[in-house]
Amino acid sequence: MAGDALPPTAMSLFDDILVLDLTSTIRGMHCTKMFGDYGAEVILVEPIGGSRARHIGPFANGKPDLETSLHFAHLNRNKQSITLNLRKTKGQEILRDLVHSADILVEDWPVGALEALGLGFADLHEINPRLVMCSITGFGQTGPYAGYKTSNIVEDAMGSLMSITGPPDKPPTMTGAQQAEHATAMHAAFATISALLYRDLHNAGQHIDVSAQECVANVLENAIEQYTYTGVVRKRAGSRHPTAWPCTVFPCNDGYIGMCCTQLKEVRAAALLADDEDLANDPVLANQFERRARADELEPRLIAGYRKYGKSELFHRGQELGCPIGMTSDARDLAEDPHLNEVGFFAEFEHPVIGKYKDIAAPVYLSETPGVMRSSAPLVGQHTAEILHSVGLGEAELSFLRADGVI
Amino acid sequence: MLNDALAGFRCVDFSWVFAGPYCGQLLGDLGMEMIKIESRKRMDVVRNYPPFAHDDRRLNSSGYWNTHNRSKYSVNLDMKSEKARELITQLITMSDLVLENFSARGMKAIGFDYGRLRDLNPRIVYCSMAGFGHRGPYKNYVAYGPMQESQAGIVNLTGWPDGQPSRVGTSYPDAAGGVSAAFIIVAALRQARRTGQGQWIDLGQTLTAAALTDTAVIEYTVNGEIQQRNGDYHRFFAPHNVYPCSGDDQWCAISVENEAEFAALSATIGQPELVRDARFVTNAARLQNRQELDEIISKWTAQYDHYDVMHKLQAAGVAAGAVLSTVEFVGDEHIKERGFMESFDHPVAGEKLYPGVPFKLSLTPGYIHRPAPCLGADTEYIFKNLLGMNDDQIKQLDDEGILV
């Protein structure tokens, strides 16, 4: 349904891949979305009554319903849905049947929960030795915190990112839009595709243990090394970059801009953008450490200039001057951005309940196998019958399973 | 010897700063042979970024560079010379991947745009990671992670409603772009094995970051709502915040998503009656009265160390996490038992600890394969082993001033 659908003869990146998706958190659902967005068949296995993600807002038109969660819709496009009661023996059997033909299984259950149902890696590996199973949890499968509960703010905290985020006069600040969860999902997807490539080459599946705490700590740039190299423990310091200057968020007359200059010519462009030629020619700018040390003194001069202009004007004029500047975009700025629209960053979706809407498509372009938006998020159990037929269950058996609360 | 998921794949790596090197770090830790092409004439700025070992700012002493460039080889070449380009050409013909994060004009300038790469090696996967990608009206705009985060919409959603928006405390779009690239690269390498054809991956770091704004766009296009930053509050659940603990600037994050967790929290803080208090009886009521609820919780948390608060609440089944500083993270008993931090001995920096691999693969675990190379440390090794050169030939290159 997307504008950039592949011609029928072309292959998509994952058109030979079946993913079983036993996830209900962003760290799980975003991981499987990355496979679905590039053509994998992803079967979302939901409990009877639907994924818990269907109960999380925002909801279309503010009306909570199993089929109106925009949180669910965003993370589950291009997937199929089957409902399956995994607490029942028959439900477990059906999952094992599906595992026979699956390439990947991704799950975000508490540590040990699937094992308790006879659906742990050891069990599934016996059924399908080529299966790549990825388990995503807050703290990993081992260690003293393995059983601990998690959430985005807990991961921000325990991964040390929160200790360096936000202004110094406020409590440690959470990442916007749940970045701990997204970072974890992306690392899980990388580990999973790597294991799949290994499986192709060596005919052996394996189990991946992803820790959100470690994924968050892995993206701290150089904060941990600052401690291990120098003993200095970084504190939160607002938006200023610890080394580069100007590299921060500045106010302007209709919002904010973000800027990050690393080279002298860029710093000069930042000064010219503020109409401050004296600063642009000031020799103090020449040394990166000296200009960073004088940030308190120099920033008000830039801000005085930027306050005269709007964020969009500053963005384009700054870029023309060679200044690495961006505006601090909100959702409307993103949705209307000419660049994002021209390069196919968005796609149109049509959902039977939510209706037609535009959302972010696969963000990375590939020359031969770009992402393919095939469908909006599935209704609860929309593909149950179809998928169970494919593993050999007839209409009569389905009726029985329904009556028995298995599907 | 341990198995490597990506053994047998080779990358010619032109990347620098953070995003490309982070991608290469992930690939190298899983066993891909990463050959960095560097030069003193065009030094990676991050080689000059702190922290510096022994507080001595000099070549090869940057911890920032060393952490993201472990598990790689370094070859130093003056890319402006014809001879160097010939050598790079040879390396490309025997590689699987070319990785770079220059501006959109960068590769053309050194003579290796995608058309050329494909002519040299039709199976090559070429990943470019320009700030805005190589297509579209902003393709020539300059961009680094910290401002991409603004443009991408993450800054606007981070921070406090009563103050200015905040950057995440790391150059997050670099890291997000790096891991996005690593994922799609391995997928494209797999595809190249299926089809015999490589392809070009046009990754724009601003785009991979903007894709992480979660429901911001869909909420705008469906409901017309523009999401705002909420500090440490969750829009839909309460309580959800960081709470002050007994130590100086010490905090514990707590998040409650359902009634069972709220009951467990109330009991743990010694106020089981809260579940019957009209102000907190439902999630909707708690959202409305969250400041009052936070004050009650804070009175309890303030009596204990942040680790104590976490352990007590987790024992009761409540999601809680101490806000760990970097020193606490490195010393954390769980992180230690998981073996997440790894050390290597570097010729200039000495023995230091680094974040290792944030996931464990049961068969091909992933680990730091070798210390970050000093500039050009592997030139001779690569030229002898891959290009079959001898000492005299290498000396001649050096005499011609190409190995700089």
Image (cartoon, rainbow, N blue to C red):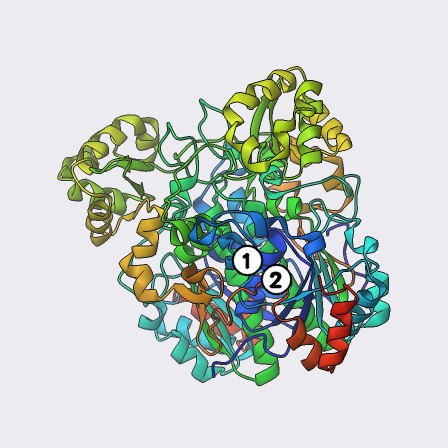
SS type, badge 1: loop
Left or right, A42 with respect to B90, comes to left
Q: Residue furthest left?
A: B270
Q: How many marks?
A: 2
Q: Quadrant of the C terminus of chain B?
A: bottom right
**Residue A233: image x %, image y %?**
36, 44
Query: Mark 2 near mark 1, Cβ–Cβ under 8 Å?
Result: yes
The residue positioned 52% from the left and 21% from the top of the image is A297
Amino acid carrying label 1: it is Asn
Q: CA distance from mark 2 to mark 1?
A: 7 Å
Check disc 2: other Cα within 10 Å, few if <14, some if 14-19, many if 20+.
Answer: many
Amino acid carrying label 2: it is Leu
* N-term-proximal mark, 2 vs 1: 1
Q: Quadrant of residue B161 in the image? A: top left
The residue positioned 44% from the left and 76% from the top of the image is B362
SS type, badge 2: loop
The chain under label 2 reads: B
The answer to whether residue A15 shows anywhere in this view is: no
Q: Look at mark 1 in the image and give the residue it sits on.
A: B60
Check disc 1: other Cα within 10 Å, few if <14, some if 14-19, many if 20+.
Answer: many
**Residue A216: image x %, image y %?**
44, 52
The residue positioned 62% from the left and 47% from the top of the image is A352
**Residue A382: image x %, image y %?**
56, 58
When the figure is inspected, residue B285 is found, relative to residue B401, above or below; the finding is above
The answer to whether residue B79 shows anywhere in this view is: yes
Q: Look at mark 2 in the image and give the residue it sits on.
A: B375
The residue positioned 41% from the left and 71% from the top of the image is A91
**Residue B94: image x %, image y %?**
75, 76
The chain under label 1 reads: B
